[in-house]
Amino acid sequence: MSDADANNFPQLFQLRQTFQGPAVDDLAGEVHRQLGSLNLEKKINPGQSVAITVGSRGIANIPAITKAIVDFVRGLKAEPFIVPAMGSHGGATAEGQIEVLKSLGVTEATCGCPIRSSMDTVVVTEAAEGFEVHFDREAFEADHVIVCGRIKLHTDFRGEIQSGLMKMMLIGLGKQRGASIYHKAFQDHSFDQIVRSVSADVVKHCRIAAGLAIVENGYEQTAVIEAVEPEKIATREPELLKLADQWMARLPFDDIDLLIVDEIGKNISGTGMDTNVVGRKRNENSATDIEKPRIKKILVRSLTEATHGNATGIGVADFTTQNVVDEMDYVKTSVNCVTSGRTAVGNIPICFATDEQTIRAALDTIGLVSGPDARVVRIKNTLHLEEMLCSRALLQEAEQRDGVEVVGELTEMKFNDKGALVDAG
């Protein structure tokens, strides 16, 4: 790239954020202490089978936490096994869901127990709203189920209950059949109503022994592990969601012209990138009047390996590169988007062959501001926000913000001879 070309792009500096929130040091010990507090030995008898859920999200320390649950159950002389609780993810196949678990580090070898993956479900009852309640057959045939999941803000829905144990009991353990039905029900009833209604049915009919809730801090570290009695999940989960909201990592600026996201994927967020972070929870391609940050354009550079081609969320972006389109698995992406009912998040945005061409085009669409003066932020993904690159136009604001440190000097935005963005440093 020539010096003249370089003048069309903003200079960048490195920014480092600090976040609040505790961290659990002894994961296995905390799992055992929490589950032990529920006196499960009075409920789970020796020789009984116990299904343990694992979802598709990139939850910190999930192999270690799952292994600790397995060991606890074995300590009761019961027989644990793992069930994938991820709705239609993994291409809506049993084999695909095992592959998703493997990508998260959850295997029979690492966790020390069998994995029973199936897309078959059992209709356990009819919800008050008039539709079938589906539940994973392997889990339903177990003597007990321990539901383990992370509590956090949902990328689509709002309210006291969002992503967590209750959603896992519906969407995750409902597999594709249940997930499809529930997402349709969300079109006619509120998310809160359906989640409360169906999760109550699941607790009543599906032998849920306990919930194990995980809350993470802004560094994507395990901040809280808490065992919850099944009947108390509906009241405790909203309280844990407040903690998750308080500790969640966010972008440090309210107004951004161009956000460059190095990678998106289902292991990052349900919509590939967390819409709570990028301010597009209500609309795919812009923030509403009550949302922050306000980002004019979003550009996505790649898919994570762990997403296995599932590009759900690419439609939240305005620009992408040809390599992202080439990496997409259209079947997985389409199945996921149709199941969720949010089909626009699978739409392919404007794409160009290289990073350089794509960034240049994006900077041409942000209004009267010139490229060198644009408010540009580059992040790895929406989970890792401790460090990022920001443009010169944001330097003064960054220097005045608490919890933000400017690292190093301004440097040019550089591309290699193939037009790919060169990492700083």
Image (spheres, rainbow, N blue to C red):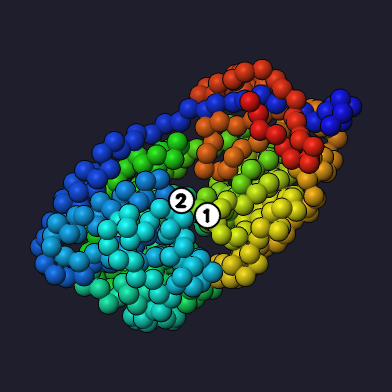
Residue 380 rendering spot, x and y as whole percentages = 59, 40
Q: Amino acid at mark 2?
A: Gly
The residue that label 1 is drawn on is: 306
Q: Nearer the viewer, residue 163 or 376?
A: 376
Q: Is residue 185 left or right of residue 313?
A: left
Relative image position of residue 36 (x, y in whole percent)? 16, 51
Label 2: element kind = loop
Distance in Å between CA atoms under marks 2 and 1: 9 Å
Mark nearer the N terminus (2 vs 1):
2
Say whether marks 2 and 1 touch (CB < 8 Å). yes
Residue 7's image quarter?
A: top right
Residue at point 34% right, 35% down?
23
> Which numbered disc covers residue 58?
2
Instruction: Please determine whether, in this image, residue 231 is positioned above or below residue 124.
Output: above
Instruction: Please rate how many residues cluster around mark 1, counting C-alpha atoms within 10 Å: few if below 14, some from 14 to 19, many from 20.
Output: many
Looking at the picture, which amino acid does disc 1 mark?
Ala
Residue 332 location (% of width, % of height): 59, 67
Q: Nearer the viewer, residue 14 or 156?
A: 14
| Left or right: 402, with 72 as reference point | right
State the residue at coordinates (65%, 49%).
302
Query: Is 365 placed left or right of 271 in the picture?
Result: right
Residue 254 % position (x, y): 63, 35
Q: Quarter holding the C terminus?
A: top right
